Amino acid sequence: MNIRLGNLVGGFSKNTYYLLILIFFFGPISWLLLASIDANPSSSWEIPQAITFEHYVELVTESDLLVWLRNSFTLAIGTMIITVVLATMAAYPLSRVSFRGKQAFMYALLLARVMPITAVIIPIFSLAVQFSLVNTFAGAILILSAMQLPISLWIMKGFVDSIPIELEESAWLDGCNRLTGLMRIVFPLMAPGVAVTGLFAFLAAWGDFLIPLIILRSPTTFPIAMGLYRAFGNEGSVNFGFLTALSVVYSVPSILLYLFARQYLVKGMTAGSVKM
Amino acid sequence: MSARVADAKSIYIFNKPISRRRLGELSLFMLMIPAMVLVIAFVVVPALWAIYISFTNQSLIGANARNFSFVGLENYAKLFKDASFWNSLKISFVYVFGSAFVGQFVIGFSLAVMLKYSGAFARGIVGGVVLLSWVIPEIVAVYIWSSVMNYQDGSANQILLSLGMERQRWLIDSSLFAIIVVNVWRGTAFTMLLFSSALEAIPETLYDAASVDGASRWERLRHITIPLLRYTILLDFILITMGTFSVFGLVFALTGGGPLGRSEIIGVYIYRNAFEYREIGYGSAASVIMLLINFVLASIYLRFIRVEWSEAA
């Protein structure tokens, strides 16, 4: 009797807890979704009286969305390519060649990874001014890639570590040298690592706010993040239909890509904290 | 002699013999050069440069932008006398403590434990919505919450009114509380994911044995789960502390640090001084303090990782 009562109370409080979690976490997002299809949207949570897709249409016809989209994709794809190519190249010697101070080097990479970008944003801006990188995608892409590389090197090294050296040795016996063996045997097997680091780099650049704020200051170079920020900063949150539809469109690629990367999230988060 | 055999195959660099094989290996390091150039240029150099500028009176524009001069410790002296700098440190501390420890850890850990024993449906839905708020772009989260916390008709006030309470000016009267709430919303998934995967590694037989011995659910948590997860707990603490300490956009775009600095974390203080008051040298002095604090946290992190490495070995 006692046990059953305990289970009942336990089950009840557990469901209450879940309900509160759902309200807290999904409530705000459900407002966004509902307001974006509401013919008469406001900042209050309400079931739309009349449903419309007008706001999404307006995005294309009456805003700079296409420019912002192009800029965001340029930024994200550029960062992804630079990060993946450089990390793939560097991961091989990091994994296979022993050298003194290797562990210290890997630690230094972790240190670089956890360094707050805000703290170095002033010199980064000065650098960008020195090298005329302000308002250029090249500048923003190089900076975003540099920020993404330490963690990418860790993840990529882990993937190379997991490729048995025996595979390469048999290729060497068949007449490959170190480099051709790397090209023919190792790079193809690194495909999952390439996918994971590529996804992470894309997502980081896609969602980033600080680097565009500092580097991409001209409206023609705004990615969606800046377009959205300026839009609600300037007009307040008045233009609900436009802003909510824009937010939804901007979030979709992030959500889809995270679904693909889901199984690697923890691995990426904890790089270095489990023996690799 | 074997030494002679090695000699025949060796190349001398600085009078030291290096085998061709080793030389071939070392030449592979050239593959690391592009990545290292980028990291050094945009991560290492900026950190050192911040220290350098912090001893100068450089400004963003104007005469002092190019022809700046050394001012010694003047920026630091001014910094330590600036009440709004101390305020930003205090705000940062409350922000990190409130959102990382009280919010993200408690909710994330409890969810990980509870979801482990829930059905696939609850896991999918509850786990999914928590994850959703983590994966959407930062600025979207800001926009959503600026509407939720709208004074006139935001849903936070809708709830208060329906409970018979008064409207709150969330972003004005309780802006620090507001940025903590939003950061909990955004960051909890990290802790949840971390513990979900750590819990999977605990063998179920341990719990079965404890149940046979009559251990209650709480006792199992207290005596099996928490001791086994002590490293994960420490790891989580240090990672979310550093993560929250680094947050910028969420606070900058939601409250701008205001009103009157009541939600001005140190990152916003740095931005404001460098890019709004245009005092790069002075802003860099604050950056150096932020780097120092982060360095202390990161040292704890690295030391702790080394402990775990040697335990795992």
Image (tube, rainbow, N blue to C red):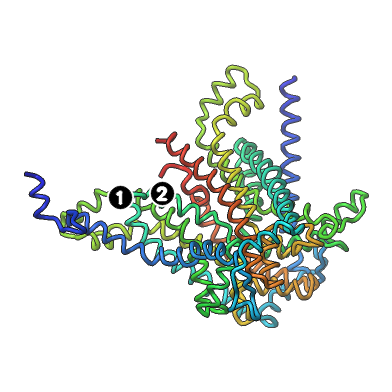
x and y percent of residue B152 in the render? 88, 63
B32 vs A164, nearest the viewer:
B32
Sequence-first tag of 1 and 2: 1
x and y percent of residue A137 in the render? 53, 76
Q: Residue furthest left?
A: B1
Q: How far apart are the two marked residues, 1 and 2, measured between alpha carbons?
A: 12 Å
B77 vs B173, nearest the viewer:
B77
> In which quadrant of the rendered view does residue B199 lie?
top right
Q: Is residue B260 left or right of residue A15?
A: right
> In which quadrant of the rendered view does residue A192 lie?
bottom left
Which numbered mark, 1 or 2, is in the foreground of this view? 2
A183 vs B131, nearest the viewer:
A183
The quadrant of the picture occupied by the N terminus of chain A is top right
| Chain of residue at mark 2 | A
Q: Residue at x 62, y 49 (%)?
A: B189
SS assignment at label 1: loop
A93 vs A202, nearest the viewer:
A93
| Chain of residue at mark 1 | A
Q: How busy is the neighbourhood of tag 2: few (under 14 within 10 Å), some, or many (20 plus)? A: few
Q: Residue at x 20, y 59 (%)?
A: B13
Q: Amino acid at mark 2?
A: Ala
The quadrant of the picture occupied by the C terminus of chain A is top left
- Residue B18 in view: no
Q: Which residue is mark 1?
A: A98
x and y percent of residue A158 in the render? 40, 50
Q: Residue at x 55, y 24 (%)?
A: B208
Q: Which residue is mark 2?
A: A104
Residue A249 drawn above or below residue A265: below
x and y percent of residue B302 in the render? 50, 45
